[in-house]
Image: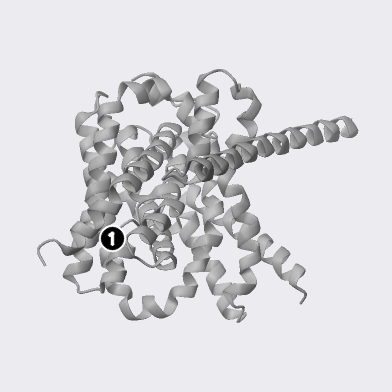
Amino acid sequence: MTALLLMARARALCRLLAQMGFLFLIFRAGQWGVARFHLPLPGNVLGMLLLFALLSLGLVRETWIQEGATVLTKHLAFFFIPIAVGLMEWWPLFRIEGHWLLLVLLVSTLATLLAAGGLAQGLGSSPPHRGGPRWEILRSSSVQSSSPSASTR
Amino acid sequence: MGDLAVIVGAIILTVGVYALSRRAFLIYRCALLSPVFLSTLVIVAVLGLSRTPFARYKPAEEIITVLLGPAVVALALPLYRQRRSLLRMLPAILAGVISGSLVSLGAAIAVARAVGLGTVIVVSLAPKSVTAPVAVEVSRIVGGNQALTAAFVIATGVLGSMFGPWFLSQIRIDDPVARGLAVGTAAHGQGTAMMLLEGETQGALSGAAMALAAIFVSLIAPFIIPWLVTVGR
């Protein structure tokens, strides 16, 4: 019984790693494309566009990357933590000019949110949402289930 | 302690702190518990208290960020699943991303000039809303400091993912499309990571906005940043 269960677990893990490896290859293809054609884009964004094109053309099936992509996007925040820890190297600058820098970043970020969000909501064809359960989706693992708010629109 | 032990310890610390802060965030839904912010704070505190310089944590950073590339590529999947609603709303999406990116550049430069920051810092601040690899490239082209820009990009991501969803709720922007779009335009990948916690629509839109903003800003920044820095002087 347990041996069978372990085998199934191991197989699922291999599948996950293979899918992540495939996504890594697409990422490297994106990096290569950016260098080769001197595009004003980062390799990861080109890789994302490339995967989108492959899915749209039917050359890659959703099931080939589903588990790997779900794990990686669900924990996208994790990969930014070590980068943010690197901010500690800039402590001397932040101690002197920190309050002004914080003001610049905060004002400009909030203004951007207002402009982009306000315009998109104003122009959007979607009906107004009446305080729907925005936070509920993740509780029951967000990424597999297709969001109801998108399909009903 | 050997170097390998430090690297393994740093990775275990990062994973453990992330797992706890993610759980805490999902329970309390408080901006101060934003996983990136809280985890970073704890790890910096641990490094500081144990007098470990960042250079010893750096190898762990390099190992973990290997997966950042494929993770961004993987954003194509939610995008693909939402392609029909995305296409239908393309005008609103483009208008939101373009206006948001222009406001981001303009507001950062205007406020930075108003408080009297030096030109190199002003220029380095300007592209802070777009994803780090693009922002750094833009910074180089317009004469900024790349490392400084990278720091501002990360700080923007932390601020945007902490306060973005809260601020949007305050100003009654509750359409999932508009929310995802706004946070992706303002706070790139870190914001997108946060929006994926809110929902698939928000996450997909945020990823799309991040990509579109990166493309748009990299095309216009070399011309518009020098102009904004000198206009009216």
Secondary structure under tag 1 reads helix
Q: Which of B183 and B165 is in front in this view?
A: B183
Is B30 placed left or right of A36 in the picture?
left
Q: Quadrant of the C terminus of chain A?
A: top left
Q: Point out the residue furthest to the left here.
A: B232
Query: Badge 1, how many Cα within 10 Å: few under 14, some, many 20+?
Result: some
- Residue A13 position, x and y percent, is 75, 37
At 55% from the left and 44% from the top, the residue drawn is A31
Q: In this view, does A41 lie above or below B199?
A: below
Badge 1 amino acid: Leu
Q: Which of A52 and B46 is in front in this view?
A: A52
- Residue B57 position, x and y percent, is 62, 69
Q: Is residue A145 above or below residue B106?
A: above
Q: Can residue B170 be seen at all in this image of the molecule?
A: no
Q: In which quarter of the image is the N terminus of chain A?
A: top right
Q: Nearer the viewer, residue B229 or A117?
A: B229
Q: Mark 1 points at which residue?
A: A106
The part of the image, by quadrant, that contains residue A125 is: top left
- Residue B222 position, x and y percent, is 30, 53
Q: Can residue B105 be seen at all in this image of the molecule?
A: yes
